[in-house]
Amino acid sequence: MSNSRDPDALAQMHTDHAIANRIASATQHSYLGDFVLGAVDGTVTTFAIVAGAAGAGFSSGVAIVLGLANILADGFSMAASNYLKTRSDHQMVDRFRQMEEMHIEEVPEAEREEIRQIFSGKGFDGAILEEIATVITKDRKRWVDTMLTEEWGLQLQPPAALRAAAITAAAFIFAGLIPLLPLFVSARLPAGKVFVTSAVLTVATFFIIGFARGRVTETKPLTSGVETLFVGGAAASLAYIVGVLLKGVAQI
């Protein structure tokens, strides 16, 4: 949502069409989180391998093999986990919907009282409260949907499981390849520059991911970019430190 105070911009945001679209989109899942999760994790874990390999003194070839194995294995693992999570969200909505349908069938007056209490908590009372309860309970689907969102806090339209998984995997693979790029041309880079180049690309990737997140969510893109850079960079730095500390162990 825009924070602009420009009168024309505010007027455009509050046309009937704009309001209807905004309300409709509020019930739909945004796949931005799936993309950011996959991209950040792909960048962090792959650079962690590059950093750990550099800290432990491994060759570029070893780092490439480990990095590609990580991209394929962890990318699939994240996609599978996200798929199962979103499937569970769908199953939970279905289970609670069946439960509410049964409650309405068996104890309708108690369920009507729940509607009254829900909207009483929002400040309605008297005849208006009774009218709200009557309108909602007149339509079975509206009644059940209201209970799912207001009583149980569920999203009526969870994300599509396959789409969420695919977006997570694609973001993981795309972003995860970036820290590996300098290793593929390591022979053409000056000695000692491979790791530095990978680190620079990783820093840029973190910032771009955060900047894009800020643009999409209409928050401060620069702040979002720096925040993502800081979080991702902390994880990557930790991996390098661990690699240095375990260098002796790797050479056993």
Image: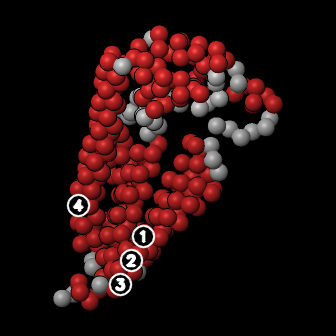
**Which residue type does callout 1 highlight?**
Ala
Name the front one of labels 2 and 4: 2
| Marked residue nearer the N-terminal end (1 or 3) | 1
Mark 1 closeness class: few <14, some 14–19, many ≥20 residues within 10 Å:
many
- Disc with the residue nearer the chain's start (4 vs 3): 4
* Residue 184 seen in the figure: yes
Residue at position x 27%, y 77% from top? 59
Identify the mark nearer the N-term, 2 or 4.
4
Classify residue 169 as left or right of residue 251: right
Residue at 43% x, 17% y: name it: 109
Residue 202 position, x and y percent, is 45, 64
In the image: residue 64, left or right of residue 172? left
> Considering the numbered disc 2 on the image, is that residue within a helix, a strand or a loop?
helix
Question: Does residue 42 lie above or below 90 as drawn?
Answer: below
Q: In which quarter of the image is residue 18?
A: top right
The residue at which mark 1 appears reads as: 236
The numbered mark, 4 or 1, whose residue comes first in the sequence reads 4
Residue 25: % across, % down: 53, 28
Instruction: Estimate how packed mark 3 is, as few (under 14), some (14 to 19) or many (20 or more) residues with alpha carbons within 10 Å.
Output: some
Image point (39%, 77%), residue name: 240
249 versus 27 height, above or below: below
Q: Do the residues bearing badges 2 and 3 touch, measured as CB atoms within 8 Å?
A: yes
The quadrant where residue 175 appears = bottom left
Cα separation, mark 4 vs mark 3, equals: 22 Å
Q: Give the distance between the C-alpha atoms of the residues marked 2 and 3, in whole angstroms.
A: 6 Å
Can you identify the residue that label 4 sits on?
69
The residue beneath circle 3 is 244
In the image, what residue type sits under mark 4?
Answer: Ala
